[in-house]
């Protein structure tokens, strides 16, 4: 269809010359929208005159303009999408992670920032706890943010992992299995450099000759996709453990070869855990639609895991904290034993103090009185991290896309038009998608904790309703993400193909209404104002992206927990 536009296409330059050669001044304007005294002085025309004299069709499609604009402004960004981290079990989840990120840049940035902040929080949470394997627990818990982490202490499995000396090798095995990085490959660095250099060169070229194919220029497109660069750089810095097969194998290998559980009767003979329940594991069963995104390892799905992950980490940290407190008070696990001091261990806890039955082990890690801090998610600071992640996510999305909106809004005729309206719709829809997915994660957590015997039990219908709402919101969000991704790509292609180079779009009818007019010939003052606006938009977009990257660099890879002396 685009290639057939030349049949009834519009030529605005020729149309303007014909109007200037006429004798009528009706509908002829200057670039400020004021009437002129002579046809030869006209540089703009009213929207109504544009339709009647020039036609309502767009300018003809030109392959040379389309190919150069597409390859310079859009193609590098589409190629950069391949550098986003994937790794989910199912290909459909990997595809959806790409659609969610492009469809809602805010959601991609939100998941990234929340992951970075959680990594720092778990290090702080475990600091000051002097007990074996605390640093290994930090590495393990921080690495499992991209997995459906689950813990189980119903038969003393988790408590046994924490206090039994036989499980020191379990922590070592799991921490070693998760100690891998996927970061800064040559292809990723080359891709980032290519995108950045291409963007800067095309910006400089556009500023050198801003009137060249101005209505088909990709200046705004470059800013609209600039959010992708800091997200890719951020994930390369973070190196999330999102390879499902590798993470699952590491957890399963540790659980099947190194895990021990305290015996119900003999405190001196813990039993190997060969099957059945595990103290820490990855949920791979089908747990229902409301919780399915938790099992998708692509980091963008971290939005669905944060609350569950935080709650589980708090349980593990609390167990370490209570065990460390008991050890500091020289309380052995077994009620029938005395505390053993071994000077050769240089302050470390003797293995003889880390033996007991399953009931004694559970009691040893259970907080019973005088809690140092209130229990619950609010005490973990998750609300603060949520607010910071939300602010930075919206800041990145609207700061970069806002730069693209400024470019097209301040290109004469200035005002809200087809291009700026399309960009605004993309950003608004991306924000709505982020909001829907975040709400679904809160409802999903409510459904899980309310239906759990240990959760705040309410009415029988409450968890079911919350689960249904969570599923519904998530499905709507994913549908919108697919539509929004398609929308922004089609908008960019239409822009390069001169589809928007028509009377309606060039006259900014959406913003100016009945006073709409089409600027056809640019004056020197127009070019100067346009350059200033474009420089401002580039500064806004690049400044926003730079601040985002600096924040991630500041908080990523925090130091490990500091043990109290």
Image: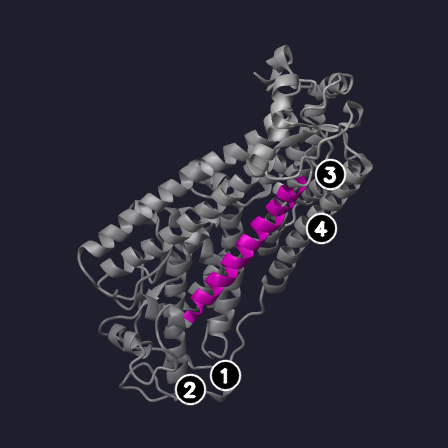
Mark 4 — residue? 539
The reply to whether discs 2 and 4 touch (Cβ–Cβ < 8 Å) is no
| Element class at badge 2 | helix
Compute the Cα span from label 3 to label 1: 60 Å
The reply to whether discs 4 and 1 touch (Cβ–Cβ < 8 Å) is no
For the point 59% across and 37% down, the residue is 512
| Element class at badge 3 | helix
Mark 2 — residue? 328
| Element class at badge 4 | helix
- Asked if residue 386 is among those painted magenta in the image, a careful observer would answer yes
For the point 51% across and 32% down, the residue is 486
User: Which mark is drawn over residue 345?
Assistant: 1
Above or below: residue 43 compared with residue 424: above
Residue extent of the magenta highlight: 380-407
Mark 3 — residue? 198
Q: Tag 2: Cα neighbours inside 10 Å, few (<14), some, or many (≥20)?
A: few
Mark found first going from the N terminus, 3 or 1? 3
Mark found first going from the N terminus, 2 or 4? 2
**Residue nearer the viewer, 148 or 302:** 302
Provide residue 237's location: percent of width, then percent of height: 61, 55
Q: Tag 4: Cα neighbours inside 10 Å, few (<14), some, or many (≥20)?
A: some
Closer to the eye: label 2 or 3:
3
Camera sees residue 228:
yes
Closer to the eye: label 1 or 2:
2
- Asked if residue 172 is among those painted magenta in the image, a careful observer would answer no
Mark found first going from the N terminus, 2 or 3? 3
């Amino acid at each position: 269809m685009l290639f057939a536009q030349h049949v009834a296409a519009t030529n605005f330059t020729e149309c303007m010359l014909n109007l200037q050669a006429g004798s009528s001044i009706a509908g002829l304007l200057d670039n400020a929208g004021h009437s002129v005294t002579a046809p030869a002085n006209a540089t703009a025309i009213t929207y109504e005159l544009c339709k009647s004299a020039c036609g309502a069709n767009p300018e003809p499609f030109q392959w040379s303009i389309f190919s150069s604009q597409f390859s310079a402004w859009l193609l590098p960004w589409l190629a950069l999408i391949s550098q986003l981290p994937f790794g989910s079990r199912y290909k459909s989840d990997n595809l959806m992670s790409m659609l969610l990120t492009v469809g809602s840049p805010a959601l991609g940035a939100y998941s990234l920032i929340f992951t970075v902040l959680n990594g720092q929080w778990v290090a702080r949470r475990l600091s000051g706890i002097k007990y074996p394997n605390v640093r290994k627990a930090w590495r393990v818990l921080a690495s499992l943010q991209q997995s459906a982490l689950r813990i189980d202490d119903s038969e003393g499995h988790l408590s046994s992992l924490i206090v039994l000396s036989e499980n020191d090798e379990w922590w070592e095995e799991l921490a070693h299995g998760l100690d891998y990085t996927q970061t800064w490959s040559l292809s990723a660095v080359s891709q980032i450099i290519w995108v950045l250099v291409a963007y800067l060169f095309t910006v400089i070229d556009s500023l050198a000759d801003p009137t060249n194919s101005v209505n088909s220029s990709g200046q705004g497109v470059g800013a609209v996709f600039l959010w992708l660069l800091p997200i890719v750089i951020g994930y390369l810095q973070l190196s999330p453990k999102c390879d499902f097969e590798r993470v699952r194998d590491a957890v399963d290998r540790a659980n099947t070869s190194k895990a021990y559980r305290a015996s119900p009767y003999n405190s001196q003979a813990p039993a190997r855990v060969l099957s059945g329940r595990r103290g820490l594991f990855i949920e791979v069963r089908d747990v229902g639609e409301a919780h399915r995104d938790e099992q998708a390892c692509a980091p963008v799905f971290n939005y669905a895991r944060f609350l569950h992950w935080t709650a589980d980490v708090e349980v593990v940290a609390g167990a370490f904290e209570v065990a460390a407190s008991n050890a500091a008070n020289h309380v052995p696990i077994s009620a029938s034993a005395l505390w053993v001091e071994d000077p050769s261990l240089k302050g470390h806890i003797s293995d003889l103090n880390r033996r007991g039955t399953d009931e004694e082990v559970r009691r040893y890690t259970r907080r019973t009185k005088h809690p140092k801090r209130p229990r619950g998610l609010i005490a973990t600071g998750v609300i603060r991290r949520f607010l910071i992640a939300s602010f930075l996510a919206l800041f990145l999305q609207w700061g970069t896309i806002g730069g693209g909106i400024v470019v097209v809004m301040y290109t004469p005729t200035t005002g809200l038009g087809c291009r700026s309206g399309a960009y605004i719709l993309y950003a608004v829809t991306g924000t709505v998608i982020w909001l829907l997915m975040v709400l679904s994660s809160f409802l999903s957590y409510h459904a899980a904790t309310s239906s759990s015997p240990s959760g705040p039990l309410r009415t029988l219908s409450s968890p079911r309703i919350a689960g249904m709402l969570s599923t519904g919101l998530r499905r709507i969000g994913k549908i919108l993400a697919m539509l929004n991704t398609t929308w922004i790509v089609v908008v960019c292609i239409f822009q390069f193909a001169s589809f928007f180079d028509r009377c309606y779009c060039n006259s900014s009818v959406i913003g100016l209404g009945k006073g709409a007019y089409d600027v056809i010939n640019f004056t020197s003052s127009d070019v100067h104002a346009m350059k200033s606006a474009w420089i401002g938009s580039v500064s806004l977009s690049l400044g926003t992206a730079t601040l985002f990257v600096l924040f991630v660099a500041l908080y990523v890879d925090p130091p490990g927990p500091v043990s109290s002396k």
